[in-house]
Amino acid sequence: MESTAIKLPPEAVDLTRLRGKNLTQVVDIQKLPKVLLHEHLDGGLRPRTVIELAEEQNYRGLPTRDAKDLADWFHRGAQRGNLPEYLEGFQHTTSVMQTPEAIERVAFEFIEDMYEDGVVYAEVRFAPILHIHSGLNQDEVVEAVIRGLERGQQTYGVEWGLIICAMRHLSSSLEAAELAIRWRERGVVGFDLAGGESGFPPKKHVEAFQAIERANFYITIHAGEAFGPESIWQALQYCGAHRLGHATRLRDDIQTMPDGSLKLGPLAQYILDRRIPLEMCLLSNVHTGATPTLEEHPFGKFFERGFRVSLNTDDRLMSDTSMTRETKLAAETFNLSLADLEKLSINAMKSAFAPYDDRISMIYEKIKPGFAKARS
Ligand SMILES: O=c1[nH]cnc2c1ncn2[C@@H]1O[C@H](CO)[C@@H](O)[C@H]1O
Ligand SMILES: [Zn+2]
């Protein structure tokens, strides 16, 4: 009897087998449903917006008023191979985010950018204390961000969560934690510790983390970016982190054996076993020197070994990146397949601080159908 099955053209059959560059040349990465968990609101402004906001707020500190030159200036400044210098550019972005209108605009444009980048769910973070220099209080700052995010969602349908950052070098982390808890009914989903890592161990802020835990709320901490496994260990075992930002230097707790297998130290084993989500940021790590090159980034190993990793942008302006770019780079550098990319989106969505039911519906209503469409 003759088969009645429809014959697919060979390239359609092969799509699921493609990897790396072969994959990124055929599949439109921008259209795949992606999830972003780690992006700084003040690290993702459009260069033109920075210039316009500087004019409106009479801020004279910008090095140039040309959008292209300004973008180059941010990229150059961020690529000096260490975190403290990487962070210098934020002085300008936070300086132009001091009025409710400016802050709301940046938040709205963030959602608009996410939509254009193919991101279906995004968690964005910032430190309200850096936005009170023109007289706003921190609640007003958070309210302005939420207004922009809500307006963006109404227009573009991108779902979001907001994370409040405390800064490692400041003593106001408890105040930031209380602020995060106060706004949880309006879309704040968690609490983070950001800023220069070396010399600022997370356990100094343990009171803030305990306040978050007592409120049954969520914690992510920048750890293992500019300091070793000790910082990651403290974040988990002193501060109760539910997720880790970067965790690049967890590689120091993992040994590659002569046969290529990985021998995990106790910290790495704990992170693997407990399914602790690692918010990995490839280009940002190259720029801050957390990894010497993209090829040597531990992401590939972590993913293969089954760690709960996700791809993230960190700071789209400083690192000249997007989710599409990070995903393409990851696919090409680590020879990923479409199934791998789907797994990364699902990993991220599973790890989001959104409620369980929302995460499930995002996975089954947006991510899986989006990838199925890409395959068909
Ligand atoms: O990669 C990073 N590591 C540590 N801190 C960062 C990174 N990117 C941005 N920030 C810091 O977080 C603040 C709130 O968004 C930013 O102002 C910047 O100082
Ligand atoms: Zn970050």
Image (tube, rainbow, N blue to C red):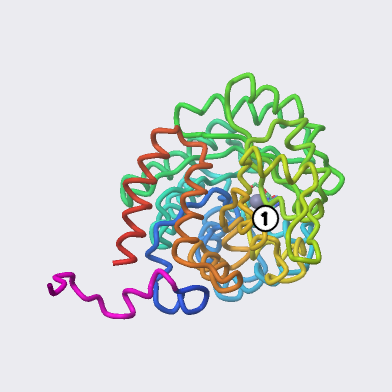
Front residue (pair 375, 199): 375
Q: Is residue 372 above or below residue 231?
A: below
Residue 135 screen position, x and y as percent:
61, 36
Q: Which residue is most to the right?
A: 199
Quadrant of the image containing the N terminus: bottom left
Q: Is residue 201 above or below residue 226?
A: above
Q: Which residue is most to the front?
A: 1
Residue 128 screen position, x and y as percent:
61, 39
Crowding near the residue tagged with mark 1, few <14, some 14–19, many ≥20 C-alpha atoms within 10 Å = some
Residue sitting at x 31%, y 46%: 365
Residue sitting at x 72%, y 39%: 270
The region drawn magenta spans 1-17
Residue sitting at x 70%, y 40%: 193
Q: Can residue 3 be found in the magenta stretch?
A: yes
Residue 275 screen position, x and y as percent:
61, 41
Amino acid type at mark 1:
Phe
Quadrant of the image containing the C terminus: bottom left
Front residue (pair 93, 270): 270
Residue 181 screen position, x and y as percent:
57, 25
**What residue is disc 1 on?**
90
Residue labelled 1 has its Cβ within 8 Å of some atom of ligand 1: yes
Q: Can residue 280 be found in the magenta stretch?
A: no
Q: Is residue 349 above or below residue 325?
A: above
